[in-house]
Amino acid sequence: MWTIIKSSREAKLIIILFVLLTVFWGYLQIVIPTDTEVHTFFGAIYGVVALFGAIFGFRVSIKWGFLKSIIGRAIAMFSLGLLAQEFGQVTLSYFHYALGKEGLYPSLGDVGFFGSIPLYIYGVILLAHASGVKIRLQSFVNKLQTIIIPLVMLGVGYFLFLQEYNFDWSNPIKIFLDFGYPFGQAIYISLAILTYLLSKGILGGIMKSKILFILFALSIQFLSDYTFLYQTSRGTWHVGEINDYMYLVAYFLMTLGLIQLKTVLNQLD
């Protein structure tokens, strides 16, 4: 990782941006009371990390052959996922600053937030394919893992958020999103875990650590989404607090994970 930081201008830029936003967030927690316009401003700007991550990711994807290669497509999907997250945040910021509306759910922003889920799922599937998971599934133990891990994650989503769910059929889109968010997130994190557990070393084993890093980034995204759902369902979510910082960390890690994949090509040359 240190070698990547020293040799990559993109990595240096995203680290500097992350540190500046971290200092800003820390200042908010220590000095400024909750729910101020400054907190809202932080919530509006930290998504720029996801935007840079998407741009850098597309550059790496092109180096891998973009849509012509499996890994190139996987990187493109993760980049689109970051771009979708930023679209959601920009949309909510527009509603706040231009229209004076807050807390809209469902809203146009959910096109981006929810849209990132199938993009991440497809990205992980492509990584799994590139990592030889299909071959490893011939083992009974591995087949058992593919059943148990998704069921556990789906169970977590159900018991945390949907156990006492009240259906409001006058708002079917909300019902779809209320179920779609936790279950969709459970699917992509389950697939990511399975990809790492079942993957063989490819390209001489140099992909293993890169896949692990992306898995870690997806795990933080997963925890961020679940924290958001948990806090909003209990009325404890506030803009510019810990959940927004968790998203910032998730975007930062995914960006570094995508930048790392560029180094694999250098090692192959």
Image (cartoon, rainbow, N blue to C red):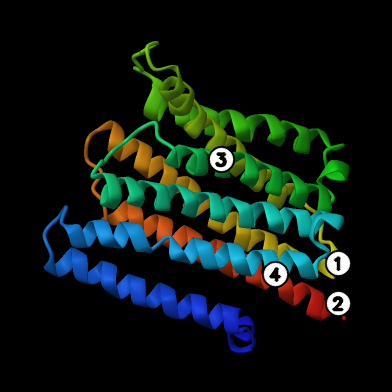
Of 230 and 155, which appears nearest the observer? 230
Measure the alpha-carbon separation of dots 1 and 3. 31 Å
Q: Looking at the image, can residue 137 be seen?
A: yes
Check contact, mark 1 vs mark 2: CB within 8 A.
yes
The disc label shown at residue 115, or none: 3
In the rendering, which numbered label is found on residue 268?
2
Please name the residue that numbered disc 1 is placed on. Answer: 203
Task: Specify few, some or many for label 3: CA neighbours under 10 Å numbering under 14, 14-19, or 20 or more.
Answer: some
- Marks 1 and 3, the one that precedes in the sequence: 3
Q: Looking at the picture, how far across and down is residue 198, in whole percent?
A: 76, 47
The residues tagged by marks 4 and 2 sit, at their Cα atoms, a distance apart of 18 Å
Q: What element carries label 1?
A: helix
Question: For mark 4, what is the residue?
Answer: 59
Q: How far apart are marks 1 and 2 (CA)?
A: 8 Å
Q: In this view, does 190 lie to the left or right of 26?
A: right
Of labels 1 and 3, the one closer to you: 3
Quadrant placement of the N terminus: bottom right
- Tag 4: amino acid: Arg
